[in-house]
Image: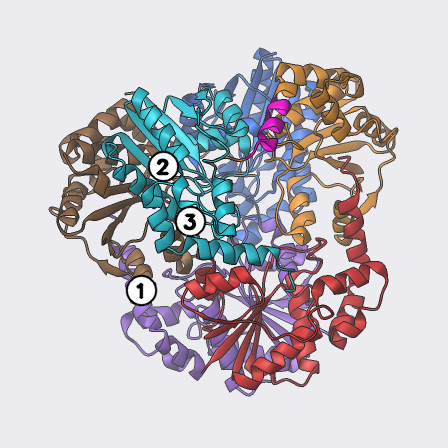
Chain colours: A cyan, B brown, C red, D purple, E orange, F blue
Amino acid sequence: MRRALLMGRFQPFHLGHLQVVRDILGEFPQLIVAVGSATFNYLEKSPFTAGERIWMIHEALAESGLDMSRIYITAYPNIENNAAWAAHLKSLLPPFHVAFTGNALPHILLKEAGIEVRPLEMINRELYCASEIRRRMLEGEDWESLVPPAVARIIKEIKGVERLKFIVRGESDPLHW
Amino acid sequence: MRRALLMGRFQPFHLGHLQVVRDILGEFPQLIVAVGSATFNYLEKSPFTAGERIWMIHEALAESGLDMSRIYITAYPNIENNAAWAAHLKSLLPPFHVAFTGNALPHILLKEAGIEVRPLEMINRELYCASEIRRRMLEGEDWESLVPPAVARIIKEIKGVERLKFIVRGESDPLHW
Amino acid sequence: MRRALLMGRFQPFHLGHLQVVRDILGEFPQLIVAVGSATFNYLEKSPFTAGERIWMIHEALAESGLDMSRIYITAYPNIENNAAWAAHLKSLLPPFHVAFTGNALPHILLKEAGIEVRPLEMINRELYCASEIRRRMLEGEDWESLVPPAVARIIKEIKGVERLKFIVRGESDPLHW
Amino acid sequence: MRRALLMGRFQPFHLGHLQVVRDILGEFPQLIVAVGSATFNYLEKSPFTAGERIWMIHEALAESGLDMSRIYITAYPNIENNAAWAAHLKSLLPPFHVAFTGNALPHILLKEAGIEVRPLEMINRELYCASEIRRRMLEGEDWESLVPPAVARIIKEIKGVERLKFIVRGESDPLHW
Amino acid sequence: MRRALLMGRFQPFHLGHLQVVRDILGEFPQLIVAVGSATFNYLEKSPFTAGERIWMIHEALAESGLDMSRIYITAYPNIENNAAWAAHLKSLLPPFHVAFTGNALPHILLKEAGIEVRPLEMINRELYCASEIRRRMLEGEDWESLVPPAVARIIKEIKGVERLKFIVRGESDPLHW
Amino acid sequence: MRRALLMGRFQPFHLGHLQVVRDILGEFPQLIVAVGSATFNYLEKSPFTAGERIWMIHEALAESGLDMSRIYITAYPNIENNAAWAAHLKSLLPPFHVAFTGNALPHILLKEAGIEVRPLEMINRELYCASEIRRRMLEGEDWESLVPPAVARIIKEIKGVERLKFIVRGESDPLHW
């Protein structure tokens, strides 16, 4: 059975990601959504824990009526040695045959490990973009319309916007200590 | 929504585990199956990678007709500091309210972190036991009847029994090098 | 017995820190001074080793006539996973009931772990500030008047200013190698 | 000022250790008590966290009427590379001139790093011995008489004996999971 | 036998390095070429793996007609704790008596560990410079004339210039994922 | 150019290893001798540092009159994730086409990574065996005749036998601390 891989940090998972998931499931019988940078959290560019991100993605895909028996969602930690990264990733995931990524480094590392890599065909990239969503959270603008309802609900439940504002304040403070 | 956690190394996932999953889903709306010792593999007591174990569990639960939208399956690496383990685990999983474990160390660590822990009510513990299954693999006895069909199929596909035999031979060899 | 925690990198410990220590000891029977980033040293922002920082703090508090039987001084290494940081910290320190910190990230992490956190009421923050002290060391200005005598004496004994100048020169050099 | 180092895991600190501390303070103006294996805890041979061990030692020495301004108590994590261990240790401690240890590996590593090492002159080694104390805890025999009163009080406060029994049960259980 | 150490990241090894090797071998019977940042690769400033760098250096020195029985070439990983770095390095290399480095941090760390350190007398530093060579690779200018023929040949064989361009593109892309 | 890999811990390098090196160089133009467990040292089964082992091997091969321009000698650290080990190893070594190993685990891991693996044809395996040599060192029997002269000379120079005896004594001592 052919299985596709979709990698990302998903800080947070948004409607652009959801569209990509739908597209891939139109072509492949199974999909692995792999949440990267698993141990990074409570940081300006990585505010949510891996567990929270798995939770958001699972609930978003389930509420969209997708067949969850065709979908794997799991997280993987980073490693320092890029040249061993593809093997590290493969050890943590079910076998996959095509990887989708919009980033150059995973692209080259997977390709050199003999894996077929395809670029993401993502709609409206400037809008459906995690850094744009975090910017809107920080500036009090609308961000809920850019993410699936389950993601918006969970971020509110965990007080994610307050967390992000708190973190950013810390990082921009002079470090007296 | 109340969510239960079932932890284990699942080397491999067997019919005793499957029964526990069914029992928990009879009581809780959602279940997280968390695969421990994620980075240990190709070892006598841990022959399968985390990815292979996620794959086996997913396929076994799906073929059993369970509602996969109610189930999370993910893996987590070990850490050295036991006293920080519960917080590490929580950061890698969606929120959970009750944890099921048959092991004393996770039991005490989760309990001291304020999490409700329940013992496993596992049928026929001598038989449905991962170390017994690995023993049978090594000695050429029947093991397939102790695991869900999907698990047996995947272990054959990845030549898991040959792998285990190869590993064990290595570990018992005198280490000339 | 109620015990307070004062965290910092203490690069170096200065008169602002000393004032905070006095204030806390006026309210709490015991105080833990915890030296963070324990394994970072010989860096522009972290020139002193954890051992040197423990040494400076101990001697500064002792020379101030404080009752050392009420004070703990210890160091702790960083970890990558912020969401597990509070548990990591707790495992390395005696029990504490209130934490004092001037930084947003420790603040939110300790608070979410159920620990009471209070901001620092530090006098003359622009002056009594470790980065200002390091700047003065580099530019040959007076810095001794901003730290307790024991700290100035130890920094001279270990040739700390020369070390800092050497390190900074290295970091600004083009990296030919 | 000459400073001595006393290293150990202190699982737990006992009256033999206390005697050694007194002896060293009779000869040296200052003493560093360094708690090793800082990140190991909730294990059969290492039941107590580094923070708990620092706490026990501090309270035991303070209740003995020793001058705490002459004593440092801190913890250090292990590293894999033994040949770099002495340098690692030195970076985490104030300068020291003589190290006391009853163990051969630290002895040789410190000596090869140019540090004077002296063996421990410990009274009644079979009795005042951490593994004997843990054995007595597990078998319900008297152990309190082998440790300073503060250590006994803290171990009771943290329910240390129950913890140890729980851990040991876990380790001797067959690992079904 | 007196042995010199030449450290660097060698991203890549160039004619300036080669000249230094010749100079050192004119004075010392043996030389260790130690490749630092061994686990960093596929990065803009560190495009080549440690293995590739060892390969380039070995072939470049051999083709230059140098006596390879007088030369060691090996790699070492970084560690976090600078104050333990010299001991870490020493454990990974044959004994050496003088270290050559053009960088301030290794200089101070080795010197404080009691090792004689000498600055590099490198010809034409602006030209024979690894960052200049990488810049030329990226901009399509001549870089081959700045490295030994074997280095140019290996970089072509591993498609190193294409790799570097790919990596840089990735790092400058907005991080949508 | 075809390049062979010979892996081992080489604790210490002996005449059996030397014979294998000669045999491989009779068939392959180049050979990589890769020293494993690079950060393990001062242990009963791993008494020598990686640097000492590289030194012994280099001097032994050079004194045997082998052409050192055909030989690479380097060390690599262990990693936890066996399934990523082959990729980790490849990143630290020049390209190789055939690997020689007498151990089952490296054998299966390299084979599954697509590398040709061949068993060692080692003469007199009971005699030319590192654990037998260490046993003889401990018991005061002849061991020098089992290793190349350069290895015996270096072990004497670093007082390796005394070190091994010291370490073993430590490990068999009851751990009072």
**Which SS class for mark 2?**
loop
Q: Which residues are magenta?
A: E163-174
**Which SS class for mark 3?**
loop
Spatial separation of the CA atoms under disc 3 and disc 2: 30 Å
Spatial separation of the CA atoms under disc 2 and disc 1: 33 Å
Question: What's the mark number on residue A49?
Answer: 3
Question: What's the mark number on residue B43?
Answer: 2
Tag 2, which chain? Answer: B
At a point 50% along the width and 25% down the height, the residue shown is: A107
Instruction: Check the image and name the residue furthest to the front.
Output: A141
Residue bearing the label numbered 1: B114
Are the residues flagged by discs 1 and 3 from a single subunit?
no
At a point 32% along the width and 20% down the height, the residue shown is: A27
User: At which x and y percent is residue F136?
Assistant: 53, 41
Residue type at the position of mark 3: Thr
- Kindly check if marks 2 and 1 are in contact, taking CB atoms under 8 A apart as contact: no
